[in-house]
Amino acid sequence: MNDLYARHRNVLPDWLALYYEDPLEITHGEGRHVWDANGNRYLDFFGGILTTMTAHALPEVTKAVSEQAGRIIHSSTLYLNRPMVELAERIAQLSRIPDARVFFTTSGTEANDTALLLATAHRRSNTVLAMRNSYHGRSFSAVGITGNRGWSPTSLSPLQTLYVHGGVRTRGPYAHLNDAEFIAACVDDLTDLLGHTRPPAALIAEPIQGVGGFTSPPDGLYAAFRDVLQEHGILWIADEVQTGWGRTGEHFWGWQAHARSGPPDIVTFAKGIGNGMSIGGVVARAEIMNCLDANSISTFGGTQVTMAAGLANLTYLLEHDLQGNARRVGGLLIERLRAVTAQLPGVREVRGRGLMIGVELVRPGTDEADPKAASAVLEAAREGGLLIGKGGGHNTSALRIAPPLSLTVPEAEEGAAILERALGSVQ
């Protein structure tokens, strides 16, 4: 056991997960690569859990942070804050929500917590609809609505949560149906559920489930849900903490794959917008955002140095069309991974969009999860110079692949080759 690992175990919680049998200390990064304390170089296909969105040590972001830190780092929301207003203006316009208001937080957990507060206050209901296999954060209220047992340490909650079918396309009671039948069955389930409960405040849903293993429904499911929700005045919260900012390639927001019935009432975001700086937030229609009848502030949400980073990062992303790059390079990477895993009996499915790709592993000859294989592939990929993630929900195990959106074609090919060898070594 290395010294830093021993010190970590002495002062930090046992439940604070670490990857790898010999945990890794990352000391610096550049572009799509990081280095550890021993000088080993890795191709980063996880980006600090989808957070290093553009590139490590992106000069435009580090320059903006340095210059802002030299002026003022923080003042709280009690004072006017130019960088916060400027970033809010850009996000409001990009959100496609009419008459949008933006509130900044420090994390995706806090963003979802705020969205739940707004929805329940606006609707005067503490009942929430959530998706099975979902994950929305680590706070008391976010854990309470999480539909993933592995990430839900308590059943206590300030909310009454009811779970809806549809977040996982290829498992569960409707998996055998075609897409149109799948959507119809899930809508029927939602309609029936609403007949058995008091009116809920909102449905919260990730367009692509992150921790759950990058699973998603057919396009249009949440639009069909929205038609039913609107009949009852129920709000739709799109959790875009992992899917936002063009990561899926085809769309800037994940909800746009379900846009037929209009935008969500509330969108939450975090992770990639700060490229490693701690930024989260909520976008909502003014009538919803302004419904609170008590004072509120955010001490660290919207602080000047993080807003400067967010502005620089968003500008770089848009000017360099990283959404288009995610679509092009991600499409190539998905097809390459499908080709190299086609003959591997332990790979059930390669799925995803853009640079958000899941590889689901099973015990060969069965449909059962193989978490040991997932851990072994993580170790083997690291040995080969590649960092990836893992996830999964009920009886599933998946590798999670989410590089910075500036990934090049040669880097995608290199990463796919390393992953092919890693998968082959444990089959």
Image (spheres, grey):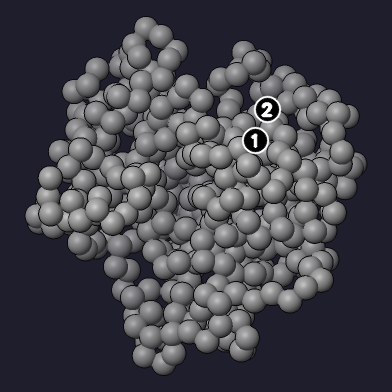
Give 76 or 234, whichever is nearer the viewer.
76
Pointers 2 and 1 in contact (CB under 8 A)? no
> What x and y, as percent, mark residue 220?
70, 36
Sequence-earlier tag: 2 or 1: 1
Q: Is residue 357 above or below residue 311?
A: above
The residue that appears at 48% across and 63% down in the rendered structure is 273
The residue that appears at 42% across and 45% down in the rendered structure is 355
Q: Secondary structure at mark 1?
A: strand
Q: Which mark is residue 131?
A: 1
Q: Identity of the amino acid at label 1?
A: Met
Q: Is residue 210 above or below residue 179?
A: below
Q: Quadrant of residue 198?
A: top right
**117 left or right, relative to 133:** right
> What x and y, as percent, mark residue 192?
84, 25
Q: Residues within 10 Å of mark 2 (few under 14, many from 20)?
A: many
Q: CA distance from mark 2 to mark 1?
A: 6 Å
Q: Quadrant of residue 165?
A: top right
Where is the C terminus found, in terms of image quarters?
A: top left
Q: Identity of the amino acid at label 2?
A: His
Mark 2, residue position? 165
- Residue at the front extreme, as displayed: 10
Q: Is residue 241 visible?
A: yes
Q: Residues within 10 Å of mark 1 (few under 14, many from 20)?
A: many
> What x and y, as percent, mark residue 349?
43, 23
